[in-house]
Amino acid sequence: MTPHHDLLLSWIDDDRHLLVQFLSDFVAKPSPNPPGDTQVAAAFLHDGVQAQGAPVAYRTAKPDWPNVVGSFDCGSKGQHLVLNGHIDVFPAGPAEGWSHDPWSGAIADNRVYGRGVVDMKCGTAASVWTYIYLHRLRDRLKGKLTLTCVSDEETGGTWGAKWLLDTFADEFRGDCVLNGEPSTPGTIRFGEKGTLRLAFEIATPGAHAAYTHMSKNAIRIAAELVRDLYTLEDLPVPQTDDVRRAIEMGRAAMDRALGAGAGRILDRVTVSAGVIQGGLKINVLPGHCRLEVDIRLPVGLSHAAILAELANITARYPEAKLSPVWTHSAEPSTCDPNHPMVGILQRAVEALGYAKPAPVVSLGATDCKHWRHLNVPAYVYGCTPNNMAKPDEWVDIEEYLHVVRTHVLAAATYLA
Ligand SMILES: [Zn+2]
């Protein structure tokens, strides 16, 4: 526990209205990706940090997609903690269904509403305020704190976290990462499933619908291929004892967080056929069909293992040409479920009167993977994903403040 516990919590209490207004104003700076222009929202963060007297700068790979970063050394030598969040959010979609303008940041019913408020402006705001508060305390802390607010997470991180790590590894690698992606207050994420996206083009000669003797039907081949791809869900998954134990213990927490069944697929392959396009007309036997499939890999399986199994399946369908979609594919990632940061987060959450959060693996992907792939442990603790990627996305104000308090206390303890 940090010796500055009471002081930090009193700052947050005093700033309550400021913190809530900050999140509302951040949501009111639209940053949908696509198209991905985050300049206004990034400037809001940059200027907000600067106004609080902490060092901050832009590091930009792609002109309209600026990353906001900052770093400071504490009073004595110690560990380097990196705070990470993203600025870009999902598009808002059609206006119908939203009871508040998606870019209003409306405050109502003890909630903040708007596109991106849970994924992940709540968590990014927690990172920003953690950085600001700990900067005030820097002479009494050890080590180094770095802030990374990135502008490309929703489309894979190429111009955000991955670019920062590839280009300025010494500055942004750190010893440990804390991220506020939505996770629910009952879980800490130490790993995440991987993604493998596949596109198939199926080509046959085609024919009149009455002349089925002349050509195979490309849609029928696609249907049979889909059925076979779903057998990948039965693949056995080799896992280390540490990961297996943590997943077993986290299943119930994942069911509570994300609905019944979430815990069961933590350590399974899942397949989702997402797009199928083929055919011209009811009386034309289709000679072309396109199929796109999203596969999620549990920790313990690699792309290579899936592709090897896939080769056995595709060998039965010579008319189907496979191309993996690497831009949105990522290997699963994991780090130590028993790392000190996990205990630090658990004790911080319990001290705030919440139940002890369970370490779990995430079903979806985050930028933490870019650090874990470099063997830097990276942990996620964030809000409940209420209506994530749907109309009327919202965060409970008390829960947002809880996430801020947890990040502030955990970071201060890690740097004590
Ligand atoms: Zn996110």
Image: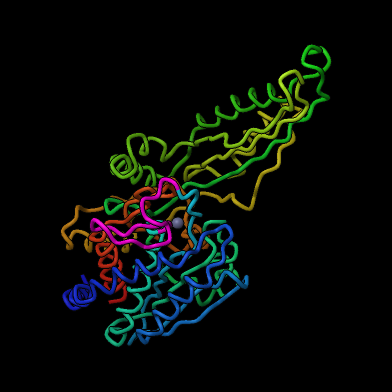
Image coordinates of residue 66 in percent, x first then y, are: 55, 73
Does 52 sit left or right of 375 as displayed? Answer: left
Membership of 110 in magenta stretch: yes
Image coordinates of residue 71 in percent, x first then y, are: 43, 80
Of residues 411 and 124, the one nearer the viewer is: 124
Number of dots carrying numbers: 0
Of residues 280 and 322, the one nearer the viewer is: 280
Question: Which color scheme did the rendering employ for the protein?
Answer: rainbow
Membership of 156 in magenta stretch: no
Q: Residue at x 36, y 50 (%)?
A: 99
Give the quarter of the image for residue 199: top right
The magenta segment is 96-116
Image coordinates of residue 32 in percent, x first then y, are: 51, 59
Of residues 19 and 271, the one nearer the viewer is: 19
- Look at the picture and state if 232 lies above or below 120: above
Q: Quadrant of ligand 1?
A: bottom left
- Look at the picture and state if 253 lies above or below 176: above
Q: Residue at x 34, y 46 (%)?
A: 246
Instruction: Work out which quarter of the rendered image holds the N terminus and state it.
Output: bottom left
- Look at the picture and state if 203 lies above or below 85: above
Does 211 sit left or right of 314 as displayed? Answer: right
Instruction: Work out which quarter of the rendered image holds the C terminus and state it.
Output: bottom left
Give the quarter of the image for residue 61: bottom right
Image coordinates of residue 302 in percent, x first then y, are: 56, 45
Please identify the dominant SS of the magenta region.
loop
Does 355 sit left or right of 298 as displayed? Answer: left
Q: Residue at x 74, y 27 (%)?
A: 280
Q: Residue at x 55, y 31 (%)?
A: 232
Does 109 sit left or right of 155 as displayed? Answer: left
